[in-house]
């Protein structure tokens, strides 16, 4: 039967919606092991299973919704999967930090080791996802955005863990807030939203600062956590300061 021309666009839209929902549901099932991993770690650690599961499901749901809106037909890929796992590991760390602050009790040594191990794995995945994206040609705008969001979330949560465990004072939270503050400033000062050139120094500063924060969570390095956090802060101040000078200089030259 021939479809009337007047109905063809409506049927095409309905067909697209159906395929989109089917694809999203299938992808959601594939991504489901990531929050299950976070919940399993929480069960082994003996803390906040329900809270971890909730945070992990929210993270995964947000990623799925973002991919559905921004992917433009590209596949999710291994690189984005690595970033998603990193987000769910961060969800576990956040649950531990919230629980520790809520009950105001010092974390047991085995839990501290678990937290450090999870944070170290998440840090490694921070390098793995970019390598996978380049190696497998999975570089995308969505992947770049999710990677930056994961970096920001992981930094904030790591600093929160340092505070909740009593390793560093509340000033360390400034490290996690530097990226959101930069983005917020760009809303007020549009010059700061201009694209930045690729910079090895920026990558080293970002990775080095995260490495210092994660190292501060290691039980044997607890006494050095404030010094490591200060080193992380100095690296980011240098990096953001250099980017700020570049953007303002470009605006002045325009």
Image (cartoon, grey):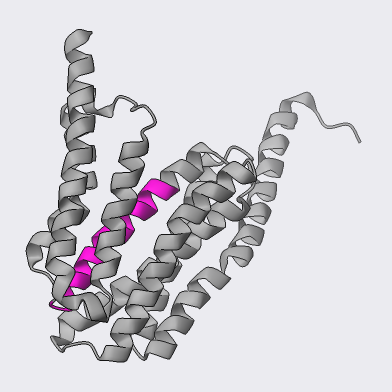
Residue depicted at 54% across the width and 53% down the height: 80
Foreground pick, 162 / 68:
162
Give the extent of the magenta segment: 147-166
Left or right: 82 in relation to 109 = right
Left or right: 141 in relation to 118 = right
Left or right: 34 in relation to 197 = right
Q: Is residue 151 magenta?
A: yes
Location of residue 202 with respect to 124 vertically, above or below: above
Residue 55, visible in the rendered structure: no
Location of residue 131 with respect to 112 vertically, above or below: above
Q: Is residue 31 magenta?
A: no
> Residue 204 occupies which quadrant of the picture?
top left
Residue at the far right in the pictured view: 1
Residue depicted at 42% across the width and 43% down the height: 145
Measured as percent of width and height from the top left, residue 148 is found at: 37, 47
Quadrant of image for the C terminus: top left
Left or right: 67 in relation to 189 = right
Measured as percent of width and height from the top left, residue 132 is found at: 58, 50
Measured as percent of width and height from the top left, residue 234 is found at: 15, 48
> Residue 48 occupies which quadrant of the picture?
bottom left
């Amino acid at each position: 039967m021939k479809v009337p021309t007047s109905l063809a666009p409506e049927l095409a839209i309905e067909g697209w919606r159906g395929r989109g929902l089917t694809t999203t549901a299938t992808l959601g099932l594939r991504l489901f092991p990531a929050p299950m991993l976070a919940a399993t770690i929480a069960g082994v650690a003996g803390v906040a299973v329900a809270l971890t599961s909730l945070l992990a499901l929210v993270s995964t749901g947000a990623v799925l919704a973002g991919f559905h809106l921004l992917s433009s037909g590209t596949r999710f890929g291994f690189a984005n999967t690595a970033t998603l796992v990193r987000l769910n590991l961060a969800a576990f760390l956040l649950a531990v930090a919230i629980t520790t602050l809520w009950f105001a009790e010092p974390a047991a040594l085995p839990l501290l080791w678990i937290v450090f191990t999870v944070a170290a794995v998440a840090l490694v995945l921070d390098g793995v996802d970019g390598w996978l994206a380049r190696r497998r040609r999975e570089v995308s705008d969505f992947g770049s955005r999710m990677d930056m969001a994961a970096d920001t979330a992981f930094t904030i949560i790591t600093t929160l863990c340092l505070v909740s465990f009593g390793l560093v004072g509340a000033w360390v939270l400034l490290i996690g807030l530097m990226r959101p503050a930069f983005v917020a400033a760009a809303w007020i000062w549009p010059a700061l939203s201009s694209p930045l050139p690729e910079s090895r120094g920026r990558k080293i500063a970002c990775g080095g600062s995260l490495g210092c924060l994660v190292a501060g969570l290691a039980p044997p390095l607890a006494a050095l956590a404030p010094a490591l956090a200060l080193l992380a802060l100095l690296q980011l101040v240098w990096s953001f300061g250099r980017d700020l000078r570049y953007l303002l200089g470009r605006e002045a030259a325009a």
